[in-house]
Amino acid sequence: LKPVFGKNPAICTAIMETNLNDIIQECKNHVAKKPDVLEWRADFFDDIADGDRLMEVLVGLRRAAGELPIIFTIRTALEGGNDSLELSHDEKIAVYHTVCKSKLIDFVDFELSNPAADIAHIREMCQSSGAKLILSYHNFKMTPEEAFIKEKFLLAENYGADVAKVAVMPKTMEDVLDFMKYTLSIQKQLGIPMIAISMGELGVISRLFGWMCGSQLTFAIGEKSSAPGQIPIKEMQTVLDLLQVNPKG
Amino acid sequence: LKPVFGKNPAICTAIMETNLNDIIQECKNHVAKKPDVLEWRADFFDDIADGDRLMEVLVGLRRAAGELPIIFTIRTALEGGNDSLELSHDEKIAVYHTVCKSKLIDFVDFELSNPAADIAHIREMCQSSGAKLILSYHNFKMTPEEAFIKEKFLLAENYGADVAKVAVMPKTMEDVLDFMKYTLSIQKQLGIPMIAISMGELGVISRLFGWMCGSQLTFAIGEKSSAPGQIPIKEMQTVLDLLQVNPKG
C-alpha cells in the first residue's frame, strides 16, 4: 500500500497544550524537531467549543506547520484523552464541521466506538474537505485476540476510512509479539493503510519495528507523551535511520 | 536467572583478525568502544594450530582486555565460520586444551553438532580451568520449528553447558516474531542462561529486544560484522540505553 503519510514509517508527535499561544509555540518546537506528521490533540484545548477560537488555532497551526500533515484528534476521557473535556454531542459534531470546512487539516481521527451515523457524518465532512479519515480503536487495558483486532481494522475499512488505527495494551511480551503477528497477517487482507501500536513499556518494540509489520505511522514524544510507551522523537529518528539505512551486518 | 555476562543484556563484539598484531590492535580498538564482552573468533587466526603462537595471542588479549570477559570461539566453515580454516580433529582438541589450561579465557563456545564425546571432553577442560561453556546451535538457512529449537536449548543444558546459544535465520517477519516467542517460552523451562538470535536484516529486532525474551547476550559490530544482521556497537548501546533507562512515555 502507498505510504499515506508521505514517509513510511512516518513519525508523529502530538500537541497537547490548553491555549492558542501555547499550542502554536508547541507546534513550532515540534517542527524544529522534524517530525513527519503533527497531531493536534484538541481535547486539551480550553476553547474547543468556541468556533472562532478554534479557527484561530487551526490557522496558527497551519502557518507554523507549513507543509507538514496535521492530524486533528479529539480523544474523550473514556477514549484515553483529556479527563476534563466537556463537550456535548452537538458541540463535537460542530467542531468537526469547523475543522473540515477550514480545509486546513490533512487527517481527522475519529473513534470507531462512536455511533455509526456520526462516523458516516464525519466521513462526508472529510470527503467534502479533502481531509483523510483515520478511524481508530483503543484499548488501554489489554490486548484482545486476533479475531477481535481484525474485526476492528476491517470495520474501519468498511466505514470508508482512509486509514485504520488500532492501539492496544500488552500485559506480557507474548501479547506484544502476538499483536505484531496479527498486524502482519491482517495487513494482507486490509485494503487501506494501517497504524498498529502495542502501548506501554513492553510495547516499545512495536513503536520501533511496527513498520516491518505494516504500521505506517509511529508516535513519538515531541515535548510531552500522548500515550504510554512513547519514546522521544530524537531517539526514534536515530533508531529508524539506523534500521532503515544500515540494517545489514 | 543471574546475568552470566555481568550486565543483562551484555553487548559482545567479535575479533576476527588473522595475525597476533592485528588481533591485539583490534582488541584495543574494541575495548575503546566499551563492549561488555569480547569474542575471539580464533578460526580466523593463521597460526591457530601452533600452541606457542596461540598462547601469545591469549596473553596479549588478556592484557588488552583487562577485566572484560573473553569468549573463545572456533567456527568451522560448515558452522558459518572461516572458509579457509584447516584444523584436524586432534589439533582442534589440542587448541581447546591450550586455551583452557591458560586460564586466560572466561567462556568457551563449542558447537552442539560436535560428537558427544568431544563435548564431554571440552566440558571437563572448562571445569578444570574455571571457564564457562557455551554450547551453541546455528542455522544460517532457516528458522526451525519450536520443538526443534527447544530441543537444542535443552540439549545444551543436558550436556552441562553454562550457557545455551541458538542463532537461526528468518525468511519472514513471522519467523522472527515466532522465534522470539519460542525463546520467551523456552527460557521458563531452561535452567541455564540463554543467547537467542534471529539473524539477517529481518532479525535485527531480536538483537535489540532479545533481552526482553530472555537472551542475555547480543552481538554488535566492533570493527567487522561476524554474522548477518549485526549493527554497530555504538548504535546498539544507544538503543539499549534508551530502552532500559527511558522506556516510559
Image (spheres, coloured by chain):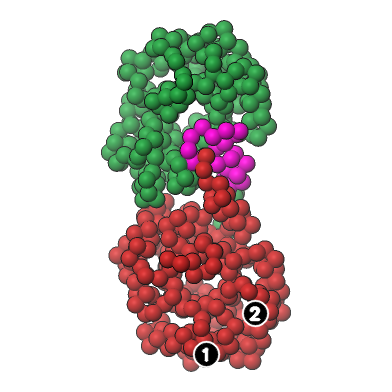
Chain colours: A red, B green
Q: Nearer the viewer, residue B42 or B130?
A: B42
Identify the residue shown where x is 66% and y is 29%.
B29
Q: Quadrant of the N terminus of chain B?
A: top left
The x, y position of residue A68, in whole percent, is 61, 72
The x, y position of residue A95, in whole percent, is 54, 88
- Does the magenta segment cover residue B226? yes
Q: Nearer the viewer, residue A208 or B159?
A: A208
Asked if labels 2 and 1 touch by Cβ distance under 8 angstroms, the answer is no
Q: Which residue is under mark 2?
A: A62
Q: Nearer the viewer, residue A94 or B67?
A: A94
Residue B27, picture quadrant: top right
Mark 1 lies on a secondary structure that is helix
Identify the residue shown where x is 42% and y is 57%.
A213
Residue type at mark 2: give it: Arg
Residue with the most extreme front position: B84
Identify the residue shown where x is 32% and y is 62%.
A146
Residue with the most extreme left position: B147
For residue A97, the mark is 1
Q: Which residues are magenta?
A: B220-241
Residue type at mark 1: give it: His
